[in-house]
Image: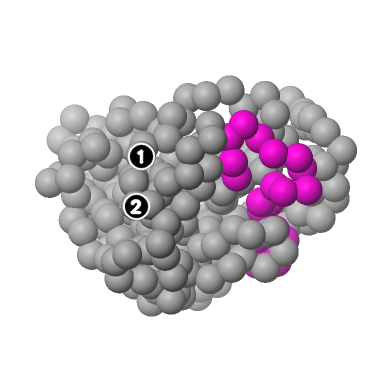
Amino acid sequence: MKETKTKEKNMSRSKAKKTRISFKPFGLNLRSLLLISIFALTGAALLGTGFAAKGGGGNTSSFVWKPYNVQIMNPVEQWIEWPFPPSSQWVTNSAATVSPPGPCAWDVDDTWYQIAMGTINPGNTVKTDHCRVADPNPIWQIRNGHAAWWSTNPRYMGVRIQSASRDLAVTISYSPQNRDFTLLPVYDSGTKQYTYRGCVALRYQPNDPNWPYERDEAVQPIPGSNGGWGVITHATVNVTNRSSRKVNATGKVEELAAWISDDTVASYCSAKRSIHDEWQHEYPFKYRLD
């Protein structure tokens, strides 16, 4: 039986030995040969239809999602020993390519956001998909020579839509969990706008025979990752104009790194990450919709 000992990892440590794909407005940084190979495999997913907006009831809405600052890191930090082992022992983010549309966030530092602005035609639904690997918590790992169950911070998705109309239907649909979240309009008298916003995170119980508590068999090996486990999850944001006229709207959807600050989370929902009672809990979800 493995020792049961949960510890919180330090998210602020140096990432000098990790490689990343970073899409920025002024160029592309390639930091290693491993990175180049990952880019070759995932470039089409990052720049192609993976982020495309989809319309229903016509395709003339100008409200279209566009991605910015896409960062996918390898190896997947929470799944490897510290100090870093040889690269042959790295757990890597194979889910970025095996589960399009991509990329799939996994490493604690993976992050990107999307912005949309324009009009949504009557009856149109505009969609965008975010993929991530939901980790079990805790993870059995060796940290500085000490083997234990180490806890991980969950990854959050933040959604914020603003419009002068309260006739939008804004939902986040999770698959394979088959769970929908509805964001309700909140009126701001200062801006004369309605805001639809929410934050959602998820993580699972381990599926490990040495875990002394209830196991979750939804957690499975990630194909091609070299030893990582999790649940490949898609979160689809749907924005529907239910009115009989065009509606102007702006929106931001962000895949938040696991170490993200409370201030950033607060831009999407009125809750601090660390305060349990400010969130609603429905396994495997943790969420706040306001």
Residue 149: numbered disc: none
Residue 287 percent across, percent down from the top left: 26, 54
Q: Is residue 41 left or right of residue 125?
A: right
Q: Is residue 279 left or right of residue 150?
A: left
Judge whether residue 212 can be spotted in this image.
Answer: yes
Amino acid type at image mark 2: Thr
Residue 229 percent across, percent down from the top left: 55, 62
Q: Secondary structure at mark 1?
A: strand
Judge whether residue 120 can be spotted in this image.
Answer: no
User: Quarter of the image containing the N terminus?
Assistant: bottom left
Q: Is residue 54 magenta?
A: no
Question: Which quarter of the picture shows residue 95?
Answer: bottom right
Q: Which residue is mark 1?
A: 7
- Within 10 Å of the Cα at label 1, are there few (<14), some (14-19), or many (20+) other Cα atoms? few
Query: Which mark's residue is nearer the viewer, 2 or 1?
Result: 2
Residue 212 percent across, percent down from the top left: 32, 64
28 in relation to 248, above or below: above
Q: Which residues are magenta?
A: 80-102
Instruction: From the viewer's side, name the closer residue of 156 and 14.
Output: 14
Instruction: From the viewer's side, name the closer residue of 157 and 138.
Output: 138
- Between the C-alphas of marks 2 and 1, the distance is 10 Å
Majority secondary structure in the magenta region: loop
Amino acid type at image mark 1: Lys
Q: Secondary structure at mark 2?
A: loop
The residue sitting at 23% across, 65% down in the picture is 282
Q: Is residue 278 left or right of residue 178?
A: left
Instruction: From the viewer's side, name the closer residue of 219 and 173.
Output: 219
115 in relation to 280, above or below: above
Q: Which residue is mark 2?
A: 4
- Within 10 Å of the Cα at label 2, are there few (<14), some (14-19), or many (20+) other Cα atoms? some
The residue sitting at 43% across, 46% down in the picture is 148
Farthest left residue in view? 277
